[in-house]
Image: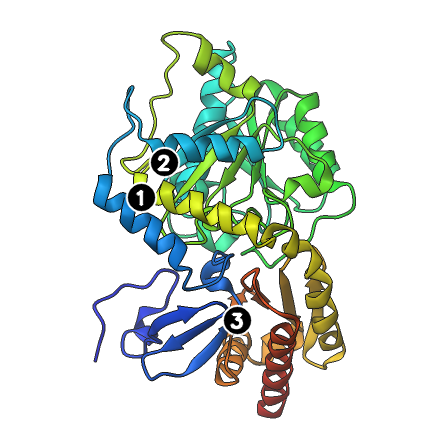
Amino acid sequence: METALWHPFSDMAVVRADEFVVERGEDVWVYDTDGNRYLDATASLWYVNVGHGRTEIADAAAEQMRKLAGYSIFGDIANEPARALAARVAGLAPMPDAKVFFTAGGGEAIDSAVKIARRYHAAQGEPGRVHVISRENSYHGTNGIGTGIAGIEANRAGFGEILPSSSRVPFDSVDALRAEILRVGPENVAAFLFEPVIGAGGLLLPPEGYVRGVIDVCHEFGVLAIADAVICGFGRLGTWFGVERWDAEPDLITFAKGVTSGYLPLGGVVAHGRVAEPFWSRPGTALRHGSTYSGHPAACAAGLVNIDLLEQDGLVERGRTMESELAEALKPLASHELVADVRAGIGLLGAVELTPDVLRRLPSAVTDLQMLARRHGVLLRPLGKALATSPPLTIQAEQIQEIADAYAAGLDELARKL
């Protein structure tokens, strides 16, 4: 039966009569409507960090909904779950006197962070600081600002120029950032956004010294450094926000996904106390920005229990202790005739990139490989030239090997097809 559901990032001319319907989940497994079981090697969309089916989160959200399902936190209104989660997240943040601004997801968090940065500079007497710099291959959601600064060209194409005062630099060069700030003029630059590990843009690992280097350059010129931890946070890189791996202290951090493990939509921005100070100490300096569902009580209740589970099950540290298992399991794939590169080794993230020749001969090769792996019971995510994995943090070593085996089997079948 043809669907009425419009899927994001999807060719509906193909999908309209050929949906893959997921019905239920249990730990690292999901089941389709025919009862077939699959290893969810992508944690849905990078986010089911504590695994599927955690009744503790469902129970907490249901209990909160029975008490107070939703309520605005505009003005002086608050609710206890939002207050408690803000305090919890601020206490985990790698910056002093942190404050937390909640959103309904990662895209809203990016828009919020950039607006906070611009408004901060205005409050400091530098209203001309509005330019935003991001990286080539970066992904920062698909809201207005996220689309305008997208480093994945295809994600900007066809929408017109949404954020004219923006530019992109190579993803792996500190010197390129310095040069761009000087080209634009430091007095015009509000912020630089970076993912500690680039996710949707191909799973690109930062060069040695990159994370600390770009933050140092930003601080040299008074530019706010915004770490996009939407994918990298809450254990994915083995720390709470990812950037701690490099002993880094950004000015703003965006988060979402793993804060609730996707059980309910929630995101936000963590602000360094210095950045929050003008808004918190000067009457009349309000941030005229926010979403209807900011601080949603049920979502925040889910976030609190999710963080409890991450802590009590040691899952944040597991993102780091299991990274070598994943890297070692994927390493042999680098010698396959169809493989150009295997990227892994920082957190529970990995990607296998196909050769230019394969992609030239078969433009659908990445999605074909995804479907072949699915037939072997493993769900992987296509990312341009590569197929990526980001399993739940609860995954076991033998299940990681199943992921590698599905990659290998799919590659062999694809080679025979070619």
Residue 335 appears in the rendering: yes
Mark 1 — residue?
298
Q: Quick check: 334 left or right of 54?
A: right
Mark 3 — residue?
380
- Residue type highlighted by circle 1: Ala
> Residue 76 at what x, y percent from top left?
29, 19
- Residue type highlighted by circle 3: Leu
Q: What residue appears at the point 72 percent right and 40 percent down from the top-left corner? A: 246
Compare marks 3 and 2 and give the one earlier in the sequence: 2
Image quadrant where one finds the C terminus = bottom right
Q: Are marks 1 and 2 in contact (CB under 8 Å)?
A: yes
Residue 34 marker: none
| Image position of 277 with respect to 385: above or below | above
Residue 81 marker: 2
| Image position of 382 with respect to 409: above or below | above
Which class describes the residues within 10 Å of circle 2: few (<14), some (14-19), or many (20+)?
many
Q: Quick check: 182 left or right of 148?
A: right
Name the residue at the right extreme.
208
> Which label sits in the foreground, 3 or 2?
2
- Residue type highlighted by circle 2: Pro
Which class describes the residues within 10 Å of circle 1: few (<14), some (14-19), or many (20+)?
many
